[in-house]
Amino acid sequence: MSTETRPVDRVTDDAPPRRTVAARGAGRTFVWMVLPAFVLFFVFHTAPVLQGVFFSFTDSPGYGEWASVGFSNYAALLGDERVRHAYLFTAQFAIVATILTNVIALAVAVALNGRIRFKTALRGIYFIPNVLAILVIGYVFQYLFTFSIPAMAQALGVERLSTSILADESLAWVAIVVLAVWQGTAFSIILYLAGLQTVPPELYEAASLDGASSWQRFTRITFPMIASFFTINMVLSLKGYLQVFDHIWALTAGGPGTATESVALLIYRGGFQGGEYGYQLANAVVFMIVIIAFALFQLRVLQRREVSA
């Protein structure tokens, strides 16, 4: 038997291994791919945020000279009744709208996922509100609440709705909720439909053979299986509704008086129209912290429920 040995390739100290060279090349490619996005994100997001935090400690009116005031702006926020009302209204609106949006969206998605006719066409129709501009639809809803609904209410003899609810301090927020839920439900439906596609049909067949009712199939199969989609929808919905601006601007502009003035609208008015640039930037910083806290709390609670489910 031949005992010949094949020559072994030797790697000299001057020539680095091929894997090391390839890894370095991949690393450089990754850096050049990420760097432009990082620069754009820093310039148009991080830098303005840091600048806003800096000016929140000043008395800047948004132009001209300014001076540092320390934490005076933040202390003044605690005793500002208008700021307190804006936060309470925003929280009330966001909680109600989030619950209604997810209940309606989940119900519609489950119905569309069943055996009904024109299912594909209905999915497209339900997504239309998400495509339309909020301001344009807001003005359409303003006409409905100002003229159409009162006219129909008068014809039907409903005194409560015979005048526009947009002029009623106790009911104007309801109109904003209706518009927000109508527009926001569309996106939530799409997410829930995507989640329902991940549920194996065999589970429903086995449950039917066991005699499970529709409600039992939903609570014990459907909802636990799409729990992660429910978490995403709840977090995105609440975050978006806490930042509500367009809906209010189109319907009531914060009125009557300041009854429907949200935090975002207050920051815009005070900062850009009222000469309170530094003060409202402090309000914006606090508002950012509140939104982050709400999101983290939601994720912690809902993800814990996912694990238990």
Image (cartoon, grey):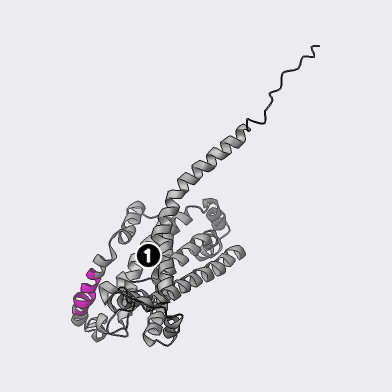
Q: Secondary structure at mark 1?
A: helix
Q: Is residue 32 visible?
A: yes
When the figure is inspected, residue 91 is found, relative to residue 210, above or below; the finding is below
In percent of width and height, residue 178 lies at 32, 73
In percent of width and height, residue 290 lies at 47, 74
Q: Nearer the viewer, residue 273 or 309?
A: 273
Write down the region rendered in magenta: 139-150
Q: Dividing the image into 4 quarters, which one contains the N terminus? A: top right
Q: Quadrant of residue 42?
A: bottom left
Label 1 Cα neighbours within 10 Å, binned few <14 / some 14-19 / many ≥20: many
* Residue named by callout 1: 185
In percent of width and height, residue 184 lies at 36, 65
Q: Quadrant of residue 272?
A: bottom left
- Does 152 lie within the magenta span? no
Q: Dividing the image into 4 quarters, which one contains the C terminus? A: bottom right
Left or right position of 293 against 264 = right
Q: Residue at x 50, y 72 (%)?
A: 293
Q: Residue at x 67, y 31 (%)?
A: 13
- Does 144 lie within the magenta span? yes
Q: Residue at x 28, y 73 (%)?
A: 249
In percent of width and height, residue 247 lies at 30, 71
Amino acid type indicated by mark 1:
Thr
Q: Residue at x 50, y 64 (%)?
A: 231
